[in-house]
Image: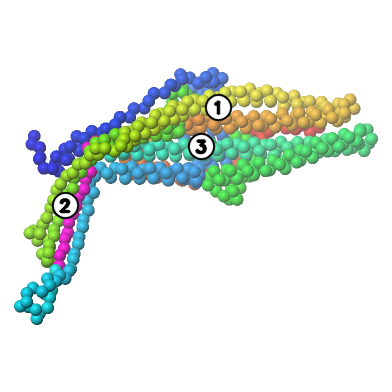
């Protein structure tokens, strides 16, 4: 095979066969346990169940949550910020990729000038200075090409692409985090409504108690202090009921901000239903490496730092470039494009730094240290992920045991209030015994609600800590930034369509209420004697 000996062909051959200095990326190993320590105490989902996909929040069976969660993707400002950051990262890939190609330009010029030769000779002194007008011009194309012989540009593309993929994973993590935050806020709101219902019923019961005690006081059969005790119980419950409105308002405001609305623009009606505790398949620990977007972010950042080492190493090698010029130049201007006025040039250059005071070695050392830091961050993120899941599993297991114990305590406390009031009416105990029983009953009921809230929040956290159905395989190859940008845009448009198709919360809550109270707002109703 005959090889062209022209400088351009030689440069192209060198470019195509050029190497990439620096280390190739290989994901470092991490220690992964065979199973979760807390898993034996966890109730698994049905064998056919798989990791939660897509709309994981539907497992809570809450109409408000089903309406608002899709809006997080399109309206949450944190998510929108990370989406813009991802677009910026993709643009940086395009900028780096452009350095693989030559820069081509065109230049045109035209000049009209008057020149003077001064006095030509004494024989023409009567004619003064001789003057001449010249017209000249040029039209030239130029090419400049820095050849990526050592792979510096390709390593830069590799670095920027990995950074863009890390940005996409960060976007996914922000979306999941904001969705979990919304689920938590809705759970808190529902528990706040349940507490309001509980205290409303408690106030009604205490009003009845006070009415009975007041009648007995009028009959002169009890001490006046019993009336004061009963009234104090009622007034304390009324004050606590009023205070619950503060917490509920804050939860509602937080929900509005999470879906990108002003608090005044979102009115959430009171609900008498509680979210359901979802069934969550946990899987084996090794799957979490592909299911958590924060782990994917750390892994892609590690890949980017590895490529940065190659960029730093490439500085040790000479820079090789080509330049070419092609066009026409003429003076006078007439006949500019005539073949006789055609000019061209082709050249190459190489430059190498001989001494830099250790700057390049320092840059390589810094890049390697940054890579080591990224590896430590990746391994730490993985360990933290395992800890998160273990914490969630242990919390759900222990809280389930506590909920069972509290349910028994609520039943006994409710029965104790009934007995104490009957004994009071029989004259065998004073009202202090009744008040103590009432306080114990209410305290256990409120604690049971708080534990129910903690279980629901822990379930939401477990879903988030397992990745919420996300997969690292959904990351787009940022080496093709235009394609990745189109995919991200299509996903955003799809999310907007889903959000617009969801019914309003008011209608959903109304429908749920008309269907019946499927979930009790309180673990037990106060006893009304």
Q: Please check the rendered image and state whether residue 150 is part of the magenta-colored stretch, yes or no.
A: yes
Report the residue marked by disc 3: 177
Residue 49 place in picture, x, y as percent: 48, 26
Report the residue marked by disc 2: 325
Residue 491 as seen in the image, left or right of residue 394: left
Majority secondary structure of magenta residues: strand
Between residue 523 and residue 230, name the one nearer to us.
230
User: Does the CB distance between marks 2 and 3 fall below 8 Å?
Assistant: no
What colour scheme governs how the chains and residues are painted in the rendered image of this protein? rainbow
Give the mark nearest the N terminus, 1 or 3.
Answer: 3
Q: What stretch of residues is rendered in magenta?
A: 135-151
Label 2 and label 3: CA atoms lie apart by 56 Å
Quarter of the image that includes the C terminus: top right
Q: Secondary structure at mark 3?
A: helix
Q: Which callout, 2 or 1, points to the residue nearer the camera? A: 2
Quarter of the image that includes the N terminus: top left
């Amino acid at each position: 095979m005959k090889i062209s000996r022209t400088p351009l062909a030689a440069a192209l051959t060198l470019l195509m066969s050029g190497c990439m200095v620096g280390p190739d990326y290989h994901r470092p190993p991490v220690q992964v346990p065979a199973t979760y320590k807390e898993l034996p105490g966890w109730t698994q989902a049905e064998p056919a169940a798989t990791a939660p996909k897509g709309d994981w929040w539907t497992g809570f069976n809450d109409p408000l949550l089903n309406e608002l969660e899709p809006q997080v993707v399109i309206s949450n400002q944190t998510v929108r910020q990370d989406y813009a950051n991802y677009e910026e990262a993709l643009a940086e890939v395009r900028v780096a990729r452009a350095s693989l190609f030559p820069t081509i330009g065109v230049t045109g010029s035209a000049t009209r000038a008057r020149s003077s030769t001064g006095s030509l000779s004494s024989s023409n002194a009567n004619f003064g200075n001789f003057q001449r007008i010249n017209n000249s011009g040029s039209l030239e194309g130029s090419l400049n090409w820095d050849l990526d012989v050592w792979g510096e540009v390709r390593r830069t593309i590799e670095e920027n692409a990995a950074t863009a993929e890390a940005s996409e994973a960060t976007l996914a993590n922000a979306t999941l985090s904001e969705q979990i935050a919304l689920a938590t806020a809705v759970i808190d709101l529902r528990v706040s409504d349940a507490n309001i219902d509980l205290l409303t019923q408690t106030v009604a019961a205490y009003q009845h108690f006070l009415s009975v005690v007041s009648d007995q006081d009028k009959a002169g059969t009890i001490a006046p202090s019993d009336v004061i005790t009963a009234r104090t119980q009622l007034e304390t419950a009324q004050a606590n009921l009023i205070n619950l409105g503060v917490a509920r308002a804050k939860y509602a405001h937080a929900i509005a901000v999470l879906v990108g609305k002003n608090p005044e623009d979102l009115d959430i009606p009171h609900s008498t239903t509680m979210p359901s505790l979802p069934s969550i398949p946990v899987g084996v620990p090794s799957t979490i490496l592909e299911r958590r977007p924060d782990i994917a972010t750390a892994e892609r950042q590690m890949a980017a730092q590895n490529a940065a080492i190659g960029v730093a190493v490439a500085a040790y090698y000479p820079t090789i470039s080509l330049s070419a010029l092609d066009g026409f130049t003429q003076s006078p201007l007439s006949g500019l494009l005539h073949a006789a006025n055609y000019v061209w040039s082709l050249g190459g250059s190489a430059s190498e730094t001989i001494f830099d005071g250790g700057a390049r070695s320092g840059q390589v050392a810094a890049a390697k240290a940054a890579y080591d830091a990224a590896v430590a961050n990746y391994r730490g993120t993985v360990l933290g992920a395992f800890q998160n899941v273990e914490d969630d599993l242990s919390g759900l297991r222990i809280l389930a045991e506590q909920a069972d114990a509290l349910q028994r305590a609520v039943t006994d406390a409710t029965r104790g209030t009934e007995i104490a009031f009957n004994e009071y009416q029989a004259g065998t105990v004073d009202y202090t015994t009744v008040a103590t029983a009432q306080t114990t009953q209410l305290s256990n009921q409120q604690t049971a609600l708080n534990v129910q809230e903690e279980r629901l929040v822990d379930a939401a956290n477990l879903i988030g800590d397992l990745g919420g159905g996300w997969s690292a395989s959904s990351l787009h190859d940022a080496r093709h930034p235009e394609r990745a940008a189109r995919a991200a845009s299509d996903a955003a448009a799809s999310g907007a369509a889903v959000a617009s198709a969801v019914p309003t919360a008011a209608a959903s809550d109304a429908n749920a209420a008309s269907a019946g109270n499927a979930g009790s707002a309180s673990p037990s109703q106060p006893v009304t004697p």
